[in-house]
Image: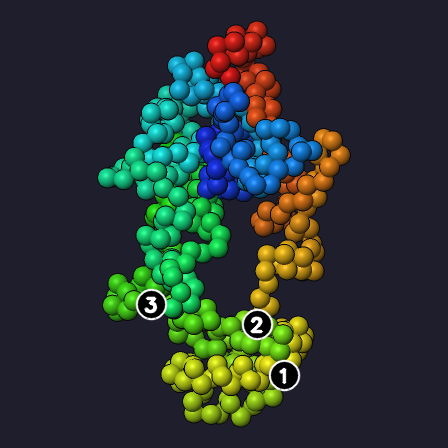
Amino acid sequence: MGLLSGVRVLAVEQYGAGPFGTAYLAAMGAEVIKIEQPGEAGGDVSRSVGPHFDASLPPTAESLFFQSFNRGKKSVTLRLDTPEGRAIFRQLAASADAVAGNLRGDVAERLGLTYAQLRETNPRIVCAHLSAYGREGERASWPGYDYQIQAELGYFALTGEPDAPPTRVGLSLIDFMTGVVLALGLVSGVMDARASGEGSDIDVSLYDVALHNLNYLASWYLNAGAETERQPRSAHPSLVPCQLYRTSDGWIYLMCNKEKFWRQLCEAIGKPEWMSDERFVDYAARLVHRDTLTVLLDAALSHDTTAGWLRRFGSRVPASPVHGLAGALDASFARKDGRIESLRTATGGELLGLRNPLRSSKPSEAPGLSPALGEHTADVLASVGIDATQQAALRAQGVI
């Protein structure tokens, strides 16, 4: 069940970006089939990524890293570097709506995963490719990862305190966003193929998504020559107050990005006179006097705890506590409304996971656990006419 029920996707994927994107498809009801190398050293490399493993899961699916990216998918082992394996892949492609991959830019064509190579088998197939730098151009053969791309495209220079070393964003946001763009492109391609009868190649790269994410900062530089720099206390480059402030027991983040929120903040902290103070009367004035306002707000907010201010502000002032990872995941709001799901393993253990954020009035069933390596090979191959005898021969050859 789900919005994508009936959509079959063959995922030649590994590690983070591609699996993160296809996990959205699985959560919405698509049948996502991971195509993985057979053998002890085979499979998605993330199956071996530590440092945390759960022994109540199958040996090839014990990695909690792997479980985070692959819930609700199927796993088929198949060697695409053999003629026999590629022939079987074409049989599977004939029954599929799309192929999704996050391989190096020059690998998809070598393995026969492009639309030009599969259209004869299935003219409606959509081939969605995620790579580091694209499948064409001077970097097509380059490997690349999230942190590298962050470093090259200014994210390190924009993150942290001004006097600190260049700092990466704490999560693999380029991987995650590129995965979501992959899923969007794939679904768009499938919609078009169902209407036109003709599939396509869809391409997205870590570099292009990270570049596009520069957004308004890029616009400011390209059109006004303004190079935005990081600000103290994670402040917004132009809107004030929008940064960290001290409370009696720590920090609070205020984000008064509308004038009405500034007025409501002044009232809530007992400083209504600040609204008419010429230093703080509008955004332009507050930007000029940001340092002065920081000192004043620190003093005012230090009269209560972060939790106390959050209770006072309620829905009137955009404000947040500054949690660590444990505080964020243990917060009562995070634990409500099914945002954290509990799954049972085959041996009776419990695995907690984050629910996919997409919600629909036609909900999908919650995805199950991530699959063991090759867990669905027999059933999926049988679904395209490869019987048990043929499968036994293929296993003996090491193709599956």
Closer to the chain start, of discs 1 and 3, is 3
Q: Earlier in the sequence, mark 2 or mark 1?
A: 2
Distance from Cα at disc 2 to Cα at disc 1: 12 Å
Left or right position of 137 against 386: left
Occupied quadrant, residue 328: bottom right
Disc assigned to residue 228: 3
- Can you tell which quarter of the image residue 228 is in? bottom left
Residue 289 position in % (x across, y down)? 41, 85
Q: Which residue is mark 1?
A: 303
Q: Disc 2 marks which residue?
A: 251
Q: Could you tell me which secondary element the residue under label 1 belongs to?
A: loop
Instruction: Tell me if label 2 and label 3 are in contact, CB under 8 Å.
Output: no
What residue is at 31 percent from the left and 63 percent from the top?
219
Amino acid type, residue under disc 3 in the picture: Thr
Whether 193 is drawn above or below 263: the answer is above
Name the residue nearer the viewer: 282 or 385.
282
